[in-house]
Image (spheres, helix red, strand yellow):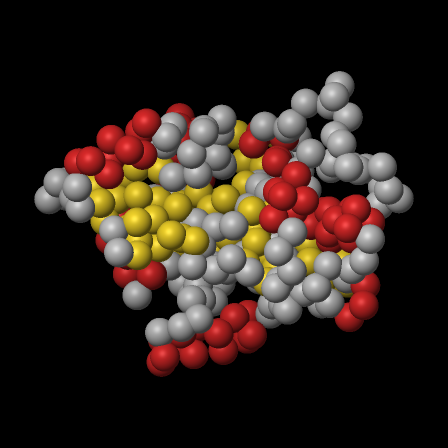
Amino acid sequence: METTSLSNGRGWLRADAAASLARVDVEIGHPLQITESGRTYAQQKAHWDHYQKYGKPIANRPGTSLHESGLAIDTDERRTEVLNRHGWFHTVYRWVNGKYTLVEPWHYEYSAGRDRYIGQPATGGTTTPPPATPTPSWEDDMPTFITSDGGQSLEIGGYIIPLANAEEVGSIQITPGKLVCSKVVHARINAIVGGRKSEDVIVNVLGGDGTRYVWAGGILTPIAYQQTVDQLIAMGAGAVDWPLAEVERILAKQG
């Protein structure tokens, strides 16, 4: 993974994410305030251990955080509209009092496939995207493998695609500009990443007890009411069928 140190001592990010942040800096006229950017495995473990002990702030298990991939930042500067155009999005939501709620407004994750200025130099002129350049699809964003103690996944444009078994892992071939995978993995990628109006995915559990889940921001949350499913579908949420073993693996990883 190619990384780049950020200006003004703000840490490091993956090279494409750092380039995006440099364009953000130019547009807002100063270096975006960064509380934290890329993390080492040891730093992520310290965050995870603190979360396990005190219950907050939320932290992913080491080996699974996009901070470790250089694709996440924490900032107290609320420039959401600008950041969204440059490929940075909120991802940490939880059910709070029956409502799906943004619980970490400071946390943004980078999706190269949604960066409207990708490839442009950080020299100004990024306030409006070039109309002739289409927004890249997930197939244009170079995927990478993530291996952790919980298994293997694909990262595509800041999204995590779980891989259920060795057959799915073995079907994947990554070359510049091309991803080869099984039909099952392809359907899962499209449900999670491709062309949806909603960032949520409804998970139907094969072999389960009938409980369905919503997959968002790398977190599985049980759905208590059919009305919630109807609302998610109305918002454009995709749906996937996952085997019970895969759901149990993810839930165990969430702790």
Depth order, front residue of 39/105: 105
| Quadrant occupied by the C terminus | bottom left
Extreme right residue here? 123
Would residue 190 appear left or right of 225 to someone viewing this image?
right
Q: In this view, does 33 lie above or below 158?
A: below
Depth order, front residue of 113/25: 25
Q: Which residue is drawn at 48% across and 34% down?
A: 193
Would residue 30 appear left or right of 178 to someone viewing this image?
right
Would residue 176 appear left or right of 219 to someone viewing this image?
right
Percent across and percent down for residue 67 are 57, 61
Q: In which quarter of the image is residue 7?
A: bottom right
Tell me if I can see residue 127 in this picture.
Answer: yes
Depth order, front residue of 165/45: 45
Percent across and percent down for residue 133 are 73, 23
Tell me if I can see residue 189 in this picture.
Answer: no
Q: Is residue 70 above or below residue 126?
A: below
| Quadrant occupied by the N terminus | bottom right
Q: Residue at x 82, y 49 (%)?
A: 26
Q: Residue at x 65, y 47 (%)?
A: 83
Percent across and percent down for residue 102 are 43, 53
Q: In this view, does 140 lie above or below 253?
A: above
Q: Which residue is drawn at 68% across and 54% down?
A: 14
